[in-house]
């Protein structure tokens, strides 16, 4: 039996891609943690990642040549699942098997968004975690974003307390497209931009609408209405661009996933009052880089946030030439002109506070504010939106048809 609290939580990373890099950098702002192990299917990537951990002095990280080796290592307490969507359920199955067989002493697991590709997968993720007694956390960084935390605290303390609860949350997230080929493949990712980014939007909106200290399920989903579209990447020139960048597996002339999604989520609070979420996401936005826009509206107040409205801006003339990169803002689209700079992306986007929260909860044996149960609830909303878009009608909850539903673009041969 694990003795809690532990002085230091020893974390093992599964996955070494773009998002793992964000999480690793954010750990510099987290106390009482060491990154002691990593597994990736690529030996080169896991060895590189282990060296990065050591360079950042975040722990004596060992690169393991199998997932079983990582989860049975004597110096790993908790697993961060950061591998591609289509691998996550298999990771949980291995972890479950090794714990049940007495070969693993892991006592906590955190999983990057979305929790799964379908509602059935999400239910199994939660069931596997609960069956092994694991403490579990759902890694939804926007809930922990610094403007979200500060804005929600002020709104509910100063405004909602005197004039009434907020009733409308709007969330939008847009950029020019993902980094890796699997994101663009409906079967591997689970869909397109709706699966990839709407998970952020609906959960941060749900969080803003939920009273401080109240459980997330205090708001009941009543109905959802979704729209998906292919606005940019199915155009022949851009489809060919994707094929050139990622190879024949990404074929947007014949097998596209949506690059635009819109959602309306109708909810009800504890008193039966109607609440609304409006959300849009796209991979068809070309601006400075990743743009997150949030609004929260109530009877006598409003909250607004735009991630590209940064205080720091830099202008570079035509004479300044350099290679392409993302040194100013994630998904950066230009190297010249007047550009906003996010000086601490890991902090502003919420990764630092998210990981600080998860580490402290796991270290002390406390239930996190975002768990696999929340990840499951998000997947149910996403599946409802996909189904609504497919049938061209509002879908009312509860919807039993979602239990084994697979989005159209994720169906093999669709």
Image (cartoon, helix red, strand yellow):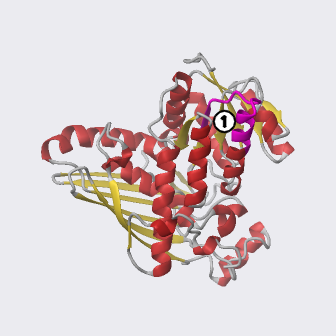
| Residue 84 shown in magenta | no
How many C-alpha atoms fall within 10 Å of the one at disc 1: few (<14), some, or many (≥20)? Answer: many
The answer to whether residue 366 is seen in the rendering is: yes
- Write down the quadrant of residue 272 in the picture: bottom left
Judge whether 245 appears above or below 327 on screen.
below
Q: Is 325 or 156 nearer to us in this picture? A: 156
Report the front residue among 277 and 271: 271
Q: Please say whether residue 100 is one of the residues in the magenta stretch.
A: yes
Q: Position of residue 403 (x, y in %)?
A: 53, 63
Residue pictured at 25% horizontal, 41% vertical: 156
- Judge from the rendering whether residue 3 lies leftward or rightward of residue 226; answer left or right: right
Residue 39 placement: quadrant: top right
Q: Position of residue 34 (x, y in %)?
A: 66, 25
Q: Position of residue 166 (x, y in %)?
A: 24, 51
Residue 12 versus residue 406 in the image, above or below = above
Camera-side residue: 221 or 316?
A: 221
Count of labels in the image: 1
Identity of the residue drawn at 74% across and 43% down: 94
Look at the image and give the residue range highlighted in magenta.
Answer: 94-110
State left or right for residue 43 relative to residue 113. Answer: right
Q: Secondary structure at mark 1?
A: strand
Residue 325 percent coordinates (x, y): 67, 53
Name the residue located 64 percent from the left edge and 38 percent from the top edge.
80
The quadrant in which the N terminus is found is top right
Point 82% across, 35% down: residue: 64
Q: Give the vertical position of 131 relative to 191 (above or below).
A: above
Q: Quadrant of the C terminus?
A: bottom right
The answer to whether residue 52 is visible is: no
- Check disc 1 and report the residue beneath it: 79
Image quadrant assignment for residue 66: top right
């Amino acid at each position: 039996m694990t003795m809690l609290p532990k002085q230091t939580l020893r974390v093992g990373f599964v996955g070494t891609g773009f998002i793992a890099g964000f999480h690793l950098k954010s750990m510099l702002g987290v106390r009482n943690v060491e990154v002691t192990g990593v597994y990736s299917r690529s030996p080169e990537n896991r060895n590189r990642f282990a060296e990065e951990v050591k360079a950042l002095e975040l722990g004596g990280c060992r690169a393991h040549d199998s997932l079983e080796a990582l989860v049975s290592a004597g110096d790993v307490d908790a697993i961060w699942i950061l591998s591609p969507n289509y691998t996550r359920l298999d990771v949980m199955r291995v972890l479950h098997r090794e714990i049940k067989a007495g070969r693993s002493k892991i006592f906590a697991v955190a999983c990057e968004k979305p929790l799964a590709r379908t509602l059935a997968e999400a239910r199994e993720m939660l069931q596997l975690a609960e069956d092994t007694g694991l403490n579990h956390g759902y890694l939804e960084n926007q809930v922990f974003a610094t403007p979200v935390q500060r804005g929600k605290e002020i709104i509910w303390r100063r405004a909602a307390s005197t004039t009434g609860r907020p009733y409308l949350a709007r969330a939008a997230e847009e950029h020019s497209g993902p980094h890796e080929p699997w994101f663009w493949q409906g079967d591997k990712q689970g869909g397109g931009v709706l699966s990839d980014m709407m998970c952020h939007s609906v959960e941060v909106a749900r969080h803003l609408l939920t009273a401080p200290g109240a459980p997330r399920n205090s708001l009941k989903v009543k109905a959802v209405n979704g729209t998906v579209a292919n606005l940019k990447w199915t155009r022949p020139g851009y489809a060919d661009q994707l094929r050139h960048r990622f190879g024949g597996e990404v074929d947007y002339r014949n097998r596209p996933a949506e690059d635009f999604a819109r959602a309306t989520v109708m909810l009800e609070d504890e008193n039966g009052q109607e609440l609304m979420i409006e959300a849009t996401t796209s991979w068809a936005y070309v601006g400075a880089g990743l743009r997150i826009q949030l609004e929260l509206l109530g009877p006598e107040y409003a909250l607004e946030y735009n991630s590209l409205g940064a205080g720091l801006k830099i202008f570079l003339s035509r004479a300044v030439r350099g290679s392409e990169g993302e040194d100013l803002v994630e998904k950066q689209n230009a190297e010249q002109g007047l550009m906003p700079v996010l000086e601490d992306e890991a902090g502003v986007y919420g990764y630092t506070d998210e990981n600080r929260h998860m580490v402290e909860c796991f270290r002390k044996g406390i239930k996190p504010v975002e768990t696999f149960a929340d990840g499951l609830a998000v997947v149910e909303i996403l599946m409802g939106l996909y189904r609504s878009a497919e049938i061209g009608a509002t879908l009312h909850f509860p919807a039993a048809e979602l239990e084994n539903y697979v989005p159209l673009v994720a169906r093999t041969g669709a």
